[in-house]
């Protein structure tokens, strides 16, 4: 019974730590989520939304593009960048670790 209590307590501690942002108490915890939105040309009033949390070896960028067509964005990684045509709809793409920001246009 004591071993079961220990495992439950350990699991709770791990779960709580994974949801916290970087702090002095937990320097190796997952970085906070970053998000961006860019207005669509068509249909007006809609947006292409992006979010990511930088990983250790790669970064997955999630998108939800409400525009009627793809939208070009520039993904800034370290000292470089790459142009990315995000298709309409919802999905994700994997980039190198170290994503700094996403800007509209290429």
Image: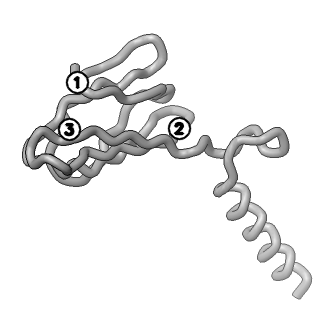
Residue sitting at 35 percent across and 43 percent down?
A: 50
Residue sitting at 61 percent across and 41 percent down?
A: 31
Between disc 1 and disc 3, the foreground one is 1
* Neighbour tally class for label 3: few under 14, some 14-19, many 20 plus, Cα within 10 Å: many
Residue 39, above or below 78: below
* Left or right: 44 in relation to 95: left
Q: Which residue is mark 2?
A: 55
- Could you say which disc has been placed on residue 49 in the image? none
Q: Position of residue 8 (x, y in %)?
A: 78, 76
Earlier in the chain: of badge 2 and badge 1, it is 2
Between disc 2 and disc 3, the foreground one is 3
- Quadrant hosting residue 26: top right
Residue sitting at 68 percent across and 64 percent down?
A: 15
* Left or right: 42 in relation to 1: left
Q: CA distance from mark 1 to mark 3?
A: 11 Å
- Could you say which disc has been placed on residue 86 in the image? 3
Tell how many labels. Answer: 3
Q: Which residue is mark 1?
A: 105
Q: Position of residue 44 (x, y in %)?
A: 13, 47
Q: Are marks 2 and 3 in contact (CB under 8 Å)?
A: no
SS assignment at label 1: loop
Earlier in the chain: of badge 2 and badge 3, it is 2
Q: CA distance from mark 2 to mark 1?
A: 24 Å
* Neighbour tally class for label 2: few under 14, some 14-19, many 20 plus, Cα within 10 Å: some
* Left or right: 101 in relation to 30: left
Residue sitting at 28 percent across and 38 percent down?
A: 38
């Amino acid at each position: 019974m004591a071993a079961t209590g220990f495992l439950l307590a350990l699991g709770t501690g791990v779960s709580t730590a994974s949801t916290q942002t970087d702090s002095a108490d937990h320097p190796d915890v997952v970085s906070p989520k970053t998000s961006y939105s860019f207005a669509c040309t068509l249909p007006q009033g809609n947006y292409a939304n992006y979010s990511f949390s930088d990983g250790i070896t790669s970064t997955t960028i999630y998108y939800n593009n409400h525009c009627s067509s793809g939208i070009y964005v520039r993904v800034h990684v370290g000292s470089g960048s790459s142009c990315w045509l995000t298709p309409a709809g919802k999905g994700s793409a994997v980039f190198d670790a170290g994503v700094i920001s996403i800007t509209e246009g290429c």
